[in-house]
Amino acid sequence: MEILLAILIGLLYSAGVYLLLRRSILKFIIGIIFMSNATNLLVFLSAGIIPGKPVFIGQETETVLQTDPLPQALVLTAIVIGFGIVVFTLALKYKFFNTTGTDDLDQLKKTDS
Amino acid sequence: MNVIALPILFPLVLIILLIFIRSKKIAGLISIFASLVLLAISLYLLQLVIKQEVIVIQMGGWEAPYGISLVLDYLSAIMLVVSAFIILTISLYAFRFIKNENFGSRFYVFFFSITMGLNGAFITGDVFNLYVWFEVILLSSFVLITLGNRKEQLEGGIKYMALNLIGSLFFLAGLGLLYGNTGTLNMAHLAQILQDDQQSLLMNTSAMLFFVAFGIKAAIFPLFFWLPSSYHTPNISVSALFAGLLTKVGVYALIRFFTLFFVQDQVFWHNLLLILAGFTMVIGGMAASTHYETRRILSYHIISQIGYMIMGLGIFTPLAIAGSIFFTVHNMIAKTNTFLVAGLVSKLKGTYYLKNIGGLYKENPVLAILFIIPAFALAGIPPLSGFFAKFILIKAGIEDGHYIITTVAILTSLLTLYSMIKIWNEAFLKKQPESTDMMLQSKLGFLDLFPSILLGAASILLGLFASQIFELTLNAANQLINPEHYIKTVLHLLP
């Protein structure tokens, strides 16, 4: 299970980086979504997962094989924050498209020179 | 000691209150009054810290490594006081300067949410909690930078958003690996575990991820590109707020992490920090000298000055860290002030472009004096604050044998001086170019100048009382380098 998840994380990261390097702003945002999901999975996985064991245990269960609940709580928080940010970026992109009519990152040179 | 949660809770109450207030004027008055209260709270906390050194509360009553602890030590308290002071001056300034903007009282809502985020980041003793505060800062700064919906603002906003979001992802990934390695996120507990940790390879992976994340926030050398392409777009009050406070949170986090628990493999990290500090100084300073737009020159300057703060961290002696903290304090005050003066100049002349303005020295000598104070402070002319800040850093560099970075730091001062003289010559000494129309002339009242006078006075006082401030920062540095007391207080190991 760990190996499968690790491969998935790698795939999501590479897809995300590929999309970040595209010229379209929308693709950039989708890339950010991919990367943030990959990061969430990384946090989830890094503490080690033990399949089929509950987080909260009664007194008779062995404590050694208990799943660590903290990373799940962290990931939950991170997902919620991620949603908020994606909504904002999409709104920004919409507004930008309405004012300038372009989705091309190469056109964004006015504030640099 | 529940009082140390006040710098977070008080802005929260204000945010909720300000949502319901539609009038810009009333919101402005509330925010001025509230920032005065916030400054009073911060000063009270600083005085408490001087008495007790480290103050801790455990949120929700969960004991230290399991719950979230809020920790106040010298560094946090100093940062709280200075940022509360900056917040006060900006709210005074914004009261006059967002009058003609098309956004209503919403500015103040996000102004205080950024304040809450900053205070939270300074106080928290938990890595994940720090991440959450960073996101609070980030989201409110997104809104502030795009408030007004001008075309450049949206463009700058996209650039600002892009790199900072990637920075957050790095932060989260580093945090995940750190938790996987150590099983804790409490900073004091991490310090205790990593004190005698030999697996520096594993730790360096997550340390590097954190370094990149904070490096993007602090705008150090290869990661600063978002800053100069976005800071000059929003309303000048917002630019000044960002210039004074945002990058410094990144520096604060770097200092906190790399003194408290990422202390293994020191040779590698300190060399890396010193090299990047040198590049940051020089490239920021050189880029500033090619521009003719005040806010751009000043934006590149922010980057250049970040180099000095990182340099102190790289030298890593108590004196050097004290120099870093002193420099951060001085820079927050002086840098905000230069932005405020740039705003005043543009209100008078209607533009930020240096080629189109001139003759201000004759027209408005008070403004000239107000500019010269922070400009000389930044360049490091005695007896202003910058001189002592640089003097401490350079002394620490020579004492510890880092001659190259010390030379670079001294030469960069000349670059800073050059840019400041350029603004001075172009805006104040040169005759007003004839081609520009003088229709935009408007008068500056005392209320416009007042925030800048406050900050200028602070720069001078920092210079005059340098020994007292230095003692305070040296206490902070000693506490950072020997974190035993910090760890024991947070984890309740003291008898």
Image (cartoon, coloured by chain):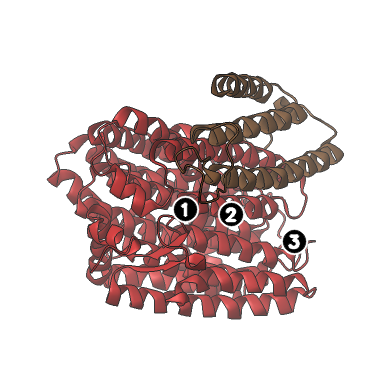
Chain colours: A brown, B red
| Residue farthest to the front, as pictured | A60
Left or right of residue B145: residue B168:
left
Left or right of residue B117: residue B30:
right
Three-letter amino acid code at the position of disc 3: Met
Three-letter amino acid code at the position of disc 2: Ile
Q: Residue at x 68, y 49 (%)?
A: B435
Question: Does label 3 or label 1 sit earlier along the sequence?
Answer: 1
Disc 1 on helix, strand or loop?
Answer: helix
Label 1 sits on residue: B249
* Residue B333: image tag: none
Disc 2 on helix, strand or loop?
Answer: helix
Question: Does label 2 or label 1 sit earlier along the sequence?
Answer: 2
Circle 3 or circle 1, nearest the eye: 1
Judging from the image, mark 3 belongs to the subunit labelled B
Three-letter amino acid code at the position of disc 1: Val
Left or right of residue B101: residue B343:
left
Disc 3 on helix, strand or loop?
Answer: loop
Left or right of residue B21: residue B199:
left
How far across and how far down the image is residue B113, in percent?
Answer: 62, 62
Label 2 sits on residue: B137
Q: Quadrant of residue A33?
A: top right
Label 3 sits on residue: B439
Cβ–Cβ below 8 Å for labels 3 and 1? no
How far across and how far down the image is residue B46, in percent?
Answer: 37, 73
